[in-house]
Amino acid sequence: MLRGRRRVLTGALALALVARAAGAAEASGEGGPPAMAFAIAPQPLATALLAWGKQANVQVLTASGSIANWRSGGAHGVLTPDAALDELLQGTDLERERYDPRTVVVRQRQNANDATPTPADPVAPFDPTTVVPLATVDVQGLVSDTGFKADTTRTVTRQETALADVPQSVTVVTREVIESQQAVDIGDVARYVAGVQYVDGYGGSPLFLIRGFDAGHGLTDGMPNGIARTEDLPPLIGIERVEVLRGPEAILGDASQNNNFGGSINVVMKRPQTDPVRTLTYSLGEYDGGRLGVDLAGAASRDGALSYRLVAAGQRGEKTPQGYGGGRGAYLAPSLAWQGANTRVMAGLEYVDNRVPGPDHSVLFGPTVSTATLATRTGDDPNDVSRFRTSRAVFELQHEFGGDWTLHSQGQYVRQRSDGRSLSYLSTGYVGALDAVARSFRYSGTYWTWQNDLSASFRHGNVTHNVLVGLDLARTHAGDNGSGSIEQGDVADDGNRNAVIVTRPIAFLRATDAFSKTFETFVAPLDTTVQHLGGSWQTNAGLYFQDQVAIGDRWNVLAALRRTSYRLDTRWEDGSPRRVDESRWIPKLGVVYKVSPTVSLYADSSTGFQPDPLLGKDGQPLPVATSRQLEVGGKFDLFDQRARLTAALYRIRVDHSVDLVSPEPPFFATPGPGQTNRGLEVEFAGRIAPGLDVLASLTEARIRNNDDTRPTGAPKHQAAVWASYRFGAGALKPWGVAAGVLARSRSLGRTSADGQYFGIPGQASVETNVSRYGPNWRVTLGVKNLFARTLYAVNFDETFVPIRQGRVVLLTGVYDF
């Protein structure tokens, strides 16, 4: 692992040369480390050396200038560490020198006239006067997912790329951050990320907002999901890292119909590896209940060519303060991989079964949040609980051809089913008057995604091209599957429908006076209604071109172009078939200028594209929505490259951002007004002192609707900081402490009945924990919302006011066996 950035002068290299004889014997295999399976893809040499050092458990010292412009063809197969390193350095003017069994120096190959010869007698005393001064060597901190700071991403460019070379704002939430914060779901993970907000949903899945826009369906292992995955996401024990990409990601094939112009969230799953993993995790907490999980991985064959991973988890929830309860969860994810000399194949399965209770909430019986009051149910309504079941099959293939060409292919097949019951409210348009209804729903969806990339690297003088050509295919079926007689155009029975919402009125206690809040039993004068959601087929195809250009050691250019084709097959109101076809060219261009090895400035322009399946008042499909983002920023490695500061300024313009849907059948829609979002985001992540890790973010955002209406759910200021400290000596050495603060300014909500605005107050929350470390275990006791503040979501209307749980005590632990 390459650690710290400090100067290693002539003496260190001289010692490495003195030890050359011993290193040569080890490299030849005499008493050296045994062969092992290596799987290092073609990539910049800097990150390839990082991957090699991590797999071989060897520290690498190298001169940054000597490797800045080199790319490696990778190393695959069962090799000794030195043989794998030689394969990485093949075609370069670099050589390796072993300093000791755990340290290797990679430097430019020396000429006979200026290289310091190895003494004839290895035990002869070292004479400093015989040393020819060499260039200083930088020990660089290219550490991937070590601590709070991550250094690489694969999602943005579909290849392993250093974050400093990416002309875009990207946040990688590492496993260390997840464990330090005692996160129990993806909503917890996203709280400290700049520009991201988590919005509770009732009668629907929660939402993530990025830069003021819905994050869309998101990505799994870099592949766009055809249907949103929120309540059916796997538990965090099955996730390796979470990447938040800012800006429209249509260039990657994410064209989900949810205004995903601000960014996307990519969940990277755990995969087979030869390094053994035997981990048991558990948590006990108020309301969340108990969780138990196991993570197993290692070699499945003697030569290490076959590896496996098995992750399993379960959860049993407790009742919330309002009495919602019965939460359950089950997760199982086996996977297997085979590594050959030039080929790696992986296949895996995933099963999620989550039973989710309704969230605690109140309703507004007046024009302000201070009038929010629980509407008491009378007992004849259903138990609020929803069930989400998802099955996922995934494969990945990587093969290296001759001439530095590499094929990478991956795909997923996902089947989702959800059903549930909930108590909801309908606004009558009068203050203090809400109608209570019980809703039950069924919904299903199926989708598959297939990505294929062919990449190669070319060098011409001081210019290196890393070219990638990709072909993507995706198909999604959502809603009714055509069972029963619907295929012939008849009205199918409700029992044959697998996409339906049934709404019936129920009795509840409602306020008769918005100010005194007196209640009376009330049954809404409504009829039971059945809403069939219909069904649709969506097909997405894309041809993708990308060139990552390194010009000298200062400039990096990322140029990409995608031809996206979208097709929607559904039916008109009379049952006749309807088809929508759209195709667009989607460009992306970004430039990085490296002021120094630790400072890089960037600028980026990217385009968003979103098809619209809704019908306008003329009965025709609405036009597609497009956006354009301009972003400039900088990335600064600090504290000997153990931490990074990222700052970004952005502007996003959308032609029509939100569809306004009529509340009455046939639910025609009109294009939204469009909007312009501007903002500043600052993030810091890493280690600032021995044992002290810090994560911090600051967001300043401004949103303007093109029709001059006021944006809702858009606080102008948002900040968060998390610090974790582990004592390093004395009686406190086994202990660690951590604490964090999340705060945001006020925002606006809007009533669904008359469109009146109301204020949502700003708020702050404090959480803290203390940990005890053992030789192979860790126990953490924490408190969330330490001061028991009343916490509201960032956006809601009068019919549903989500209230976050009060003070929560949580015990988590990890045991490696």
Image: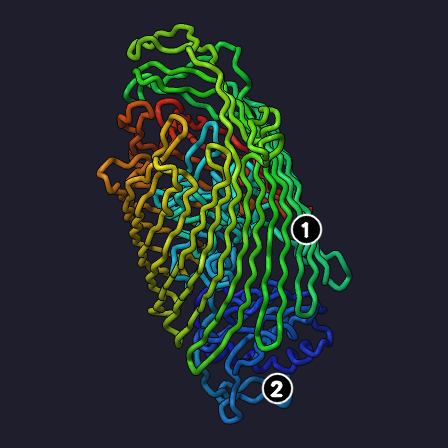
Between the residue at mark 2 and the residue at mark 1, the CA separation in whole angstroms equals 54 Å
Instruction: Name the residue: 50% across, 67% down.
Output: 468
Amino acid type for the residue under numbered disc 1:
Ser
Residue wearing tag 1: 335
In this view, the residue farthest toward the bottom is 113
Residue 374 vertical placement versus 814 (above, below) = above
Q: Is residue 158 visible?
A: yes
Q: Is residue 727 visible?
A: no
Q: Secondary structure at mark 1?
A: strand
Instruction: Name the residue: 52% across, 14% down.
Output: 381
Instruction: Name the residue: 48% across, 27% down.
Output: 203
Residue wearing tag 2: 124
Amino acid type for the residue under numbered disc 2:
Ala
Q: Are marks 2 and 1 in contact (CB under 8 Å)?
A: no
x%, y% of residue 608? 38, 52
Instruction: Name the residue: 51% across, 74% down.
Output: 457
x%, y% of residue 6? 44, 68
The image quadrant where one finds the N terminus is bottom right
324 and 175: which is toward the camera: 324
Image side of residue 395 versus residue 751, left or right = right
Image side of residue 398 versus residue 620, left or right = right
